[in-house]
Amino acid sequence: MPDAQTTAHIIDGKAFAAGLRARVAAEVARFRDYHQGRPGLAVVLVGEDPASQVYVRNKGKQTVEAGMESFEHKLPADTTQEQLLTLIAGLNHNDAVNGILVQLPLPGHIDAEAVIDAIDPAKDVDGFHVVNTGKLTIGADDALVPCTPLGCLMMLKDHLGDLTGARALVLGRSNIVGKPMASLLLREHCTVTIAHSRTRDLAAECARADILVAAVGRERMVKGDWIKPGATVIDVGINRIPAPEKGEGKTRLVGDVDFDAAVKVAGAITPVPGGVGPMTIACLLRNTLVAACQQHGYAKPDL
Ligand code: GUN
């Protein structure tokens, strides 16, 4: 008989995201029946960053597929901050627009914080405005929550059920992922640690964690032997590395976790690609519908 090699359950983010998109589409249909109008999402792209162009195209496509209205604003790289703020003011006042997303990063001459600050918090489907980060921190019900950590939390709850009392380690302290992830896990009654580049003994911190969320943007930094046996590992990293085995000049995507080693130790793990990535846009669609419902005083859809 072959050796029984234990391997982690692979959390299928692609399938989970497809399910969430279907639930959002069903709720959008209900919204349209009741409201005689559809939720609208405005996406603003400044410049020609190729990766951002792909994201924005996918957002627009999936918004329409969910039955919502998509407004795309593609502005040249030399757009001034004032011009961008004028566009946002118009979107804030446009009743057909329920959600506003300004694709990051912005060109260097534009102050991203000032731009995020100009978005109406009720339409801030990225959840980056200080009003929403504050609401998340105090556990307010109507906070719009950043999409990537929200997707991570949904997958964790789907796999583990109740997270109460679990030791969670968030690796990374960005405003987009690490900090909101920690707030969400705290809201679920986890014991939360945030580790980062200056943490003294990262391996020891990881070894204590029942839940490990890696969001540092360093390819395969988390080693298999850092992981607590049976832990649930969520890998937010999307890092492109050379893949000469696929041919000259070819590349492939890897996460922040050394998947091949981690899969032999963890209880469950998200792959890269096909893990967290597909959940981000699905959560953006969810947030747009939630924002539209909140703006009209309708009950929050159950998603
Ligand atoms: N760029 C990379 N991820 C994101 C995101 O979640 N929101 C926005 N606005 N820009 C991004």
Image (cartoon, rainbow, N blue to C red):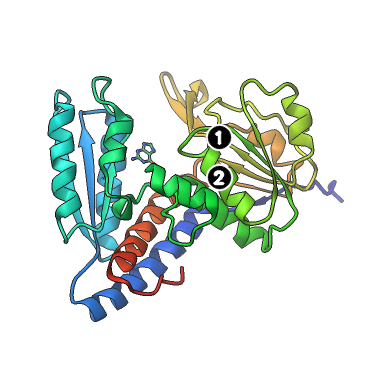
Q: Does mark 1 have its CB less than 8 Å from ligand 1? A: no
Residue on which the image places disc 2: 181
Residue 66: percent from left, percent from top = 30, 64
Residue on which the image places disc 1: 215
Q: Amino acid at mark 2?
A: Met
Q: Is residue 127 visible?
A: no
- Occupied quadrant, residue 286: bottom left
- Secondary structure of the residue carrying tag 2 is helix
- In this image, 193 relative to 240: left or right? right
Residue 147: percent from left, percent from top = 43, 49
Q: Amino acid at mark 1?
A: Ala
Label 1 crowd bin: few (<14), some (14–19), many (20+), radius 10 Å = many
Residue 19: percent from left, percent from top = 46, 64
Q: State the residue at coordinates (49%, 21%).
A: 244
Residue 253: percent from left, percent from top = 49, 32
- Secondary structure of the residue carrying tag 1 is loop
**In front of the other: 155 or 183:** 183
**In front of the other: 227 or 131:** 131
Label 2 crowd bin: few (<14), some (14–19), many (20+), radius 10 Å = many
In the picture as drawn, the residue positioned furthest to the bottom comes out as 34
Q: State the residue at coordinates (27%, 30%).
A: 50
Which mark is first along the chain, 2 or 1?
A: 2
Q: State the residue at coordinates (29%, 65%).
A: 295
Real-space Cα separation, disc 1 to disc 2, in angstroms = 10 Å
Q: Quadrant of ligand 1?
A: top left
- In this image, 147 relative to 260: left or right? left
Residue 157, numbered label: none
> Are the residues at dot 1 and dot 2 in contact (C-beta closer than 8 Å)?
yes
